[in-house]
Amino acid sequence: MASRMARYKTPWTLCACEGIAVNARPNKFTKAELDSFIVAIAAGGAHSLAWRRNGGVACWGWNNHGKAPPAGVEGDFVAIAAGSRHSLALRRNGTSVACWGFNQLGQAPPGGMDGDFVAIGAGAHFSVALRRDGSVACWGRNDAGQAPADGVPGPFKTPEVCNIRVVTK
């Protein structure tokens, strides 16, 4: 195992997250400390993402193709997803999905994807996003019908999804 890890040592990077001892100062955190807290995590093929309370994304793991930039990804995001070799983040206003990493099969277009989205997901080499109207947008590899170019009409929604309100800072 040690030799296997040594083989991969060079391309791996790790984002140092601030360690804050919750029991040391209960309920007495600075705004900067609160903003750095992790709200959600996602794991890809050889990289991981963490969505911070401030809306930014921390990344660590193997950063080939830019899927896990050590400095993270700044933005005002509300959700994250990690595919095999790409990453996604849903912008707070729901109007677009930011994409980064491997894009040979169209799963992570550098300009992102525009739409009225409420949720996102990432597969091995494809991506999906739930639109507010309940339909699903798909992009990337579609060799097994997993990401039809025209999406999936749905409706895949519940009353809770229909009534989502966007809250701005």
Image (cartoon, rainbow, N blue to C red):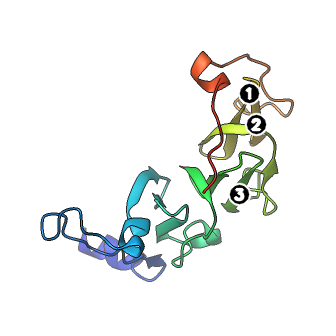
73 to 126, vertically: above or below: below
**Residue 164 lies in what quarter of the image?**
top right
Q: Residue at x 17, y 70 (%)?
A: 25
User: For numbered disc 2, what is the local secondary structure?
Assistant: strand
Q: Taking 73 as reference, is 3 left or right? A: left
Question: Which part of the image, by quadrant, shows the N terminus?
Answer: bottom left
Between the residue at mark 3 and the residue at mark 2, the CA separation in whole angstroms equals 14 Å
Rate crowding at label 1 as few (under 14), some (14 to 19) or many (20 or more) other CA atoms within 10 Å.
few
- Amino acid on which the number 2 mark rests in the picture: Cys
Q: Residue at x 13, y 70 (%)?
A: 24
162 to 141, vertically: above or below: above
User: For numbered disc 1, what is the local secondary structure?
Assistant: loop
Q: Which residue is mark 2?
A: 138
Residue 145: give x, y in percent of width and height.
74, 27
Front-most of 153 and 28?
Answer: 28
Between the residue at mark 1 and the residue at mark 3, the CA separation in whole angstroms equals 23 Å
Q: Which residue is mark 3?
A: 98
Decide which of tag 3 and tag 2 comes sooner along the chain: 3
Marks 2 and 1 close (CB-CB < 8 Å): no
